Amino acid sequence: MELHVRDDLQCHRCLGPLVLTARVPYSFSRTDGQVVSGLRGISLCASCDRNDPPAQGVLAYLVLNPTVADDDAFAALVAEWACRKADLLVAETVPEEDGPDQP
Protein backbone atom coordinates (compact mmCIF):
# COMPACT_ATOMS: atom_id res chain seq x y z
CA MET A 1 0.00 0.00 0.00
CA GLU A 2 1.21 3.49 -0.85
CA LEU A 3 0.24 6.01 1.84
CA HIS A 4 0.47 9.81 1.67
CA VAL A 5 -0.44 12.18 4.50
CA ARG A 6 -1.94 15.16 2.66
CA ASP A 7 -3.25 18.62 3.27
CA ASP A 8 -3.11 19.88 -0.30
CA LEU A 9 -5.95 17.87 -1.87
CA GLN A 10 -9.69 18.37 -1.66
CA CYS A 11 -12.26 15.75 -0.80
CA HIS A 12 -14.39 14.89 -3.84
CA ARG A 13 -17.46 14.65 -1.60
CA CYS A 14 -17.36 17.90 0.43
CA LEU A 15 -14.40 19.83 -1.09
CA GLY A 16 -12.78 20.02 2.35
CA PRO A 17 -9.15 19.06 2.91
CA LEU A 18 -8.13 15.41 2.81
CA VAL A 19 -6.20 13.95 5.72
CA LEU A 20 -4.49 11.22 3.74
CA THR A 21 -4.64 9.22 0.55
CA ALA A 22 -3.61 5.67 -0.23
CA ARG A 23 -3.42 3.29 -3.16
CA VAL A 24 -4.52 -0.20 -2.23
CA PRO A 25 -4.55 -3.43 -4.21
CA TYR A 26 -7.88 -5.04 -4.99
CA SER A 27 -9.22 -7.94 -6.99
CA PHE A 28 -12.47 -9.68 -7.73
CA SER A 29 -13.64 -12.59 -9.89
CA ARG A 30 -16.02 -11.91 -12.72
CA THR A 31 -18.93 -14.23 -13.39
CA ASP A 32 -16.86 -15.87 -16.15
CA GLY A 33 -14.16 -16.71 -13.59
CA GLN A 34 -11.63 -14.16 -14.80
CA VAL A 35 -9.88 -12.33 -11.95
CA VAL A 36 -9.69 -8.56 -12.27
CA SER A 37 -7.05 -6.84 -10.14
CA GLY A 38 -5.33 -3.50 -9.82
CA LEU A 39 -4.82 -0.53 -7.52
CA ARG A 40 -7.56 1.77 -6.23
CA GLY A 41 -7.09 5.21 -4.77
CA ILE A 42 -8.81 5.85 -1.44
CA SER A 43 -8.94 9.00 0.64
CA LEU A 44 -9.71 9.98 4.22
CA CYS A 45 -11.67 13.15 4.94
CA ALA A 46 -12.11 14.25 8.57
CA SER A 47 -15.58 15.58 7.82
CA CYS A 48 -17.04 12.91 5.54
CA ASP A 49 -15.49 9.87 7.25
CA ARG A 50 -15.97 10.92 10.89
CA ASN A 51 -18.70 8.30 11.50
CA ASP A 52 -16.75 5.35 10.09
CA PRO A 53 -15.19 3.45 13.04
CA PRO A 54 -11.90 2.51 11.29
CA ALA A 55 -11.53 6.11 10.07
CA GLN A 56 -12.19 7.38 13.59
CA GLY A 57 -9.12 5.50 14.83
CA VAL A 58 -6.87 7.09 12.21
CA LEU A 59 -8.34 10.54 12.78
CA ALA A 60 -7.96 10.28 16.57
CA TYR A 61 -4.35 9.15 16.19
CA LEU A 62 -3.56 12.12 13.97
CA VAL A 63 -5.14 14.56 16.44
CA LEU A 64 -2.94 13.19 19.22
CA ASN A 65 0.13 12.75 16.99
CA PRO A 66 0.22 15.53 14.37
CA THR A 67 3.61 14.36 13.13
CA VAL A 68 3.39 10.82 11.80
CA ALA A 69 6.42 8.69 12.52
CA ASP A 70 7.27 5.09 11.71
CA ASP A 71 4.77 3.75 14.22
CA ASP A 72 3.25 0.26 14.39
CA ALA A 73 0.07 1.59 16.04
CA PHE A 74 -0.53 4.05 13.21
CA ALA A 75 0.24 1.38 10.62
CA ALA A 76 -2.33 -0.96 12.19
CA LEU A 77 -5.01 1.76 12.27
CA VAL A 78 -4.35 2.71 8.66
CA ALA A 79 -4.38 -0.94 7.56
CA GLU A 80 -7.76 -1.50 9.23
CA TRP A 81 -9.20 1.65 7.64
CA ALA A 82 -7.74 0.87 4.19
CA CYS A 83 -8.98 -2.73 4.19
CA ARG A 84 -12.51 -1.65 5.08
CA LYS A 85 -12.50 1.15 2.53
CA ALA A 86 -11.07 -1.10 -0.19
CA ASP A 87 -13.66 -3.81 0.56
CA LEU A 88 -16.45 -1.26 0.21
CA LEU A 89 -15.04 -0.04 -3.11
CA VAL A 90 -14.75 -3.57 -4.49
CA ALA A 91 -18.34 -4.29 -3.45
CA GLU A 92 -19.42 -1.21 -5.41
CA THR A 93 -17.29 -2.23 -8.42
CA VAL A 94 -18.16 -5.90 -8.88
CA PRO A 95 -20.67 -6.23 -11.71
CA GLU A 96 -23.67 -8.45 -11.14
CA GLU A 97 -23.40 -9.85 -14.65
CA ASP A 98 -20.85 -9.55 -17.45
CA GLY A 99 -21.39 -9.50 -21.13
CA PRO A 100 -22.62 -7.38 -24.01
CA ASP A 101 -26.27 -8.45 -23.55
CA GLN A 102 -26.66 -6.56 -20.29
CA PRO A 103 -28.77 -3.37 -20.32
Image (cartoon, rainbow, N blue to C red):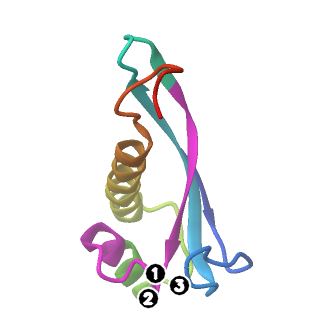
Alpha carbon of mark 3 to alpha carbon of mark 1: how far? 5 Å
> Is 82 or 48 nearer to us in this picture?
48
Which numbered circle lies on residue 62? 1
Residue 103 point in image, percent of width and height:
47, 35
Residue ID for mark 2: 63
Instruction: Kindly give the residue lying farthest to the left in the view shown.
Output: 53
**Which residue type does callout 2 highlight?**
Val
Q: Contact (CB < 8 A) between labels 1 and 2? A: yes
Kind of element beneath mark 1: helix
Q: Real-space Cα distance between discs 3 and 2? A: 6 Å
How packed mark 2 is, by other alpha carbons closer than 10 Å (few <14, some 14-19, many 20 or more), is: few
Name which residue type carries label 1. Answer: Leu
Circles 3 and 1: CB atoms closer than 8 Å:
yes
94 within the magenta span? no
Q: Which residue does the image show at 25% across and 72% down from the upper left?
A: 53
**Residue 91 coordinates in the image, percent (x, y):** 34, 44
- Between residue 59 and residue 18, name the one nearer to us: 18
Q: Which mark is residue 66?
A: 3
In the displayed structure, 12 sits above or below 46; it is above
Q: Which residue lies furthest to the top in this view?
A: 33
Query: Is residue 39 found left or right of 64 in the rendered image?
Result: right
Q: Do the residues labelled 3 and 2 touch (CB within 8 Å)?
A: yes
Q: Residue at x 44, y 81 (%)?
A: 48
- Quick one: SS at disc 2? helix
